[in-house]
Image: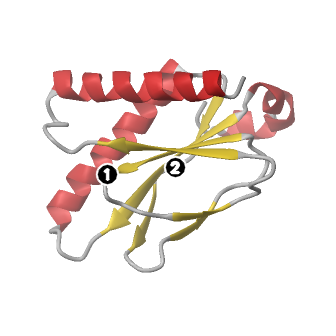
Amino acid sequence: MQWTSEQLNNWEELRSYVDTALLPLYLYRQELAVPRHVERMTALANAALAVEQRLKGRVLQLPLTYQGEGRNVFFLPAGFPVYVILRFAGDEWIYEYDRDASVVHTLSVWEEDLADPLRFQAAVDVLHEAIIESWRSLG
């Protein structure tokens, strides 16, 4: 589910059904032109939305977050047993979270032809299956 004001008001009721936070993270690189950043950020946000729609009810998708190059530390929101990070291949982050209570799965979105609907659907299929597999591995 995505954040809406109604769901925020009912968060405590919904909380028991949501065990996974889906976080699309974008690393802003100086060498890329602004139009390329917009394309990439849009593709990443759209991939997260499509994956979330398939897993609705168990996953809470947070808004796309971007950060410039540097130490690339990201503090994950507390209280989720599973975090799924969507990012582009090659973007490296350091995640701060309760390592005793949670697990992080980092999945890469590829950049080639994401504007192509068939390629995009294939990417979403792969990401969806990877998340299902990560849940299975938890027992």
Q: Is residue 52 above or below residue 5?
A: above
Q: Amino acid at mark 2?
A: Pro
136 left or right of 123 in image: right
In front: 77, or 3?
A: 77
Q: Which label lies toward us, 1 or 2? A: 1
Q: Residue at x 24, y 29 (%)?
A: 120
Helix, strand, or loop for circle 2?
A: loop
Label annotation for residue 89? 1
Question: Residue 127 falls in which quadrant of the image?
Answer: top left
Q: Give residue 59's position: percent from left, percent from top.
A: 62, 31
Cα gap from disc 1 to disc 2, whole angstroms: 19 Å
Quadrant containing the N terminus is top right
Say which label, 1 or 2, has the lower sequence index: 2
Q: How is the image coloured?
A: secondary structure
Q: In the figure, 35 relative to 139: above or below?
A: below
Q: Position of residue 74 (x, y in %)?
A: 57, 65
Rendered location of residue 41, percent (x, y): 31, 52
Which residue is identified by label 2?
63
The image quadrant of residue 117 is top left
Q: Amino acid at mark 1?
A: Ala
List x then y, in percent, for residue 123: 30, 29
